Amino acid sequence: MSDAADAAPHRPIRSFVLRAGRMGPGQQRALDELGPRFLLPYQAQPMDFRSVFGREAPTVLEIGFGMGDATAQIAAALPGTDFVGIEVHAPGVGALLKRIGEMGLTNLRLVQHDAVEVLESMIPPRSLAGVHLYFPDPWHKKRHHKRRLVQPAFVQHLATRLAPGGYLHCATDWQPYAEQMLEVLSAEPALRNTAEGFATRPHWRPSTKFEARGLKLGHGVWDLLFRKR
């Protein structure tokens, strides 16, 4: 192997693949009109949530909000909590911005960037009241399991961003991934399980269209709810 190859920078394993997706006209309009107010640029420095939202309130981070339906419902139901949603796919960002405008939401901000980098650079330690991770890509094939987001190093770092008593709520409809999540989260000493194994669905997580479709097909859904010690 050449010296140049030896010196090549390490490429981190991504938990996502950027897919080409078409932006609808409503999504593009929302991005153009509402993006400047609600879409936060990625910056390699910690956010000041009080400055971002203009108030002092508990802040919850959602990783990978998809098209944002559940995110908008949760933010609307919990107006006293502020939410930061992370998503890499532009159509999902546009769709959620559109919902923000339609529903008049003021307690939600979005970041279109890799969640791992946002967590490392933009989220201050011990600052989050909660983290939502709903239906992340399970990467079904064994050779792709290394791409799964819920890994020991990620969970360890995530725990440093939770305030004492803050919660981590995960949900998946893929049982092998649910079992891996339970194993990894249970092994993290900074977290404690609030249930004996899997949890019942908390009141704040609405049932999504994706979830309802899976249940009709006979799929199970597993929730996990851990708290920072």
Image (tube, rainbow, N blue to C red):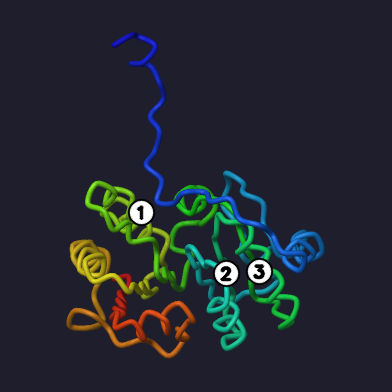
Identify the disc placed on residue 67: 2
Where is mark 1, residue-wise? 157
Q: Residue at point 62% right, 49% down?
A: 42
Question: Residue 2 placed where, x, y %?
Answer: 33, 9
The amino acid beneath tag 2 is Met
Q: Residue at point 39% right, 73% down?
A: 166
The amino acid beneath tag 3 is Ala
The residues tagged by marks 1 and 2 sit, at their Cα atoms, a distance apart of 26 Å
Is residue 87 rendered to the left or right of residue 52? Answer: left
Q: Is residue 4 above or below residue 121?
A: above
Where is mark 3, residue-wise? 95
Which tag is nearer the camera, tag 3 or tag 1?
Answer: 3
The residues tagged by marks 3 and 1 sit, at their Cα atoms, a distance apart of 29 Å
Residue 179: quarter of image: bottom left
The amino acid beneath tag 1 is His
Question: Residue 126 placed where, x, y %?
Answer: 43, 63
Earlier-in-chain disc, 3 versus 1? 3
In the image shown, does 171 or 116 lie closer to the viewer? 171
